[in-house]
Amino acid sequence: MARALARRRDMAALVARIRSAELAVRRAGARRLPTLDAVAEARYNKGNPFLPEHENRISAEIRWRPFAGGTIAAREGEAEARLSALRARRITLRRDIKIQVGRALRRLEHARDGIELARVGVNSAEATRDTRAAQLAGGRARMDDLLEAEATLAERRAEARIARLRTMSAWIALQGAVGNDDIIATLSRTADRR
């Protein structure tokens, strides 16, 4: 589950938005503090007799808005509300990812059980076909019985192929749920080439 949370792009985007919102809360609170600007300037003059040859200036400016607390508090509250909403969305997304991964795992387990069941079905159909062929050779069965056994075997083999495809589909869904998008993209490109 931790791997899925770390690899999912939607979770990574949400975590980045939460970090941005945390910085916005800090920035809104920092507006209460005074700011200090320092400026230094040096000028040199050559050839103009009306201006001094060189001039240096240094200045400092302090800005502080002590009576802007109401607007600052409103901005800070708005930023905190956005942050709380994003954190709630992260909890919801974690729950949704956990549900997606659980469903994908159950689907994969079910598909693997389907493969085993299909294997047993193919084995049973092969045994039935072999029995019908032996009975036909001994004169105790008809050709229709053998053909029916062959048709049943063909159905069971098709069901086995479908079970393998369902397993592959379930595995791909699990990769998507845990955030292995690179595997899915590779499979898509390979399928497009065919």
Image (cartoon, helix red, strand yellow):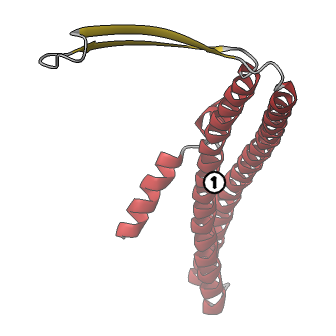
Q: Is residue 1 visible?
A: no
Which element type, helix, strand or loop, lies under badge 1?
Answer: helix
Task: Please identify the quadrant where the C terminus is shown.
Answer: bottom left
Residue 28 lies left or right of residue 43; in this view the side is right
Identify residue for label 1. Answer: 173
Measured from the top left, where is residue 81 in percent x and y?
85, 36
For the residue carrying disc 1, how many other residues have a C-alpha within 10 Å: few (<14), some (14-19), or many (20+)? many
Q: Amino acid at mark 1?
A: Ala
Measured from the top left, where is residue 6 in percent x and y?
62, 32
Q: Is residue 147 above or below residue 175?
A: below
Q: Is residue 29 above or below residue 155?
A: above
Q: Is residue 142 above or below residue 111?
A: below
Query: Closest to the observer: 25 or 183?
Result: 25
The residue drawn where x is 58% and y is 77% is: 154
Q: Is residue 146 visible?
A: yes
Task: Please identify the quadrant where the N terminus is shown.
Answer: top right
The residue drawn where x is 63% and y is 34% is: 16
